[in-house]
Amino acid sequence: MLGTWTPDDPSQPQIDSQILIEAASLVTDLDQLDSNTFNIKPEWISTVASWLKLPEETWQAAVEELSNEQQRQLAVFFTATEMQINEWQSDSRNPTIYILRLMKSQGAYPEKDFVRGLKSLTKNRYIPYGSAL
């Protein structure tokens, strides 16, 4: 059976890998973070807020080419900034969940201490595993 080609939806925002790389570079050490650590560029706020509505597959495709370290840094970034920026509160749709699922599928799931550190940065009960259903 032949598949059908579906054009990209021009109304759906595309995740900018350069912003992701820049955001990852803001994370230095999980042990030194709290939820107010990052100075977010003002233009990122609405841009990233629109990305938070995107499906898991889109997020995973956007981060799968990044190194494991960059993926870890983004998990920290999105966990901590959700507490800092109201527009980024995403509960079970937090990109951290999608990133950690991708890392697990790649055989690179972070150690328990890292996961505990993430949980200490947030009140989001869905991090790190997502919704139970």
Image (cartoon, grey):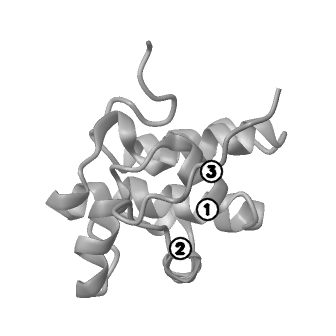
Confirm or deny contact between disc 2 and disc 1 (CB under 8 A). Answer: yes
Q: Amino acid at mark 3?
A: Gln
Q: Nearer the viewer, mark 2 or mark 1?
A: 1
Rendered residue at 33%/63% (across/down)? 11
6 or 124, nearer to the observer: 6
- Residue at the farthest left position: 86
Q: Nearer the viewer, mark 3 or mark 2?
A: 3
Rendered residue at 80%/45% (across/down)? 108
- Of marks 3 and 2, which one's residue comes earlier in the chain? 2
Rendered residue at 30%/87% (across/down)? 41
Specify the label residue 62 is tagged with: 1
Q: In this figure, which residue is indicated by the disc labeled 3? A: 60
Whole-percent x and y of residue 132? Answer: 44, 14
Q: Quadrant of the N terminus?
A: top right
53 or 24, nearer to the observer: 53
Q: Residues within 10 Å of mark 3 (few under 14, many from 20)?
A: some
Q: Quadrant of the C terminus?
A: top left
Mark 2 vs mark 1, CA separation in Å: 9 Å
Q: Secondary structure at mark 2?
A: helix
Q: Secondary structure at mark 3?
A: helix
Say if 79 sits above or below 66 in the image. above
Q: In this image, 117 relative to 124: left or right?
A: right
Mark 3 vs mark 2, CA separation in Å: 12 Å
Q: Amino acid at mark 2?
A: Leu
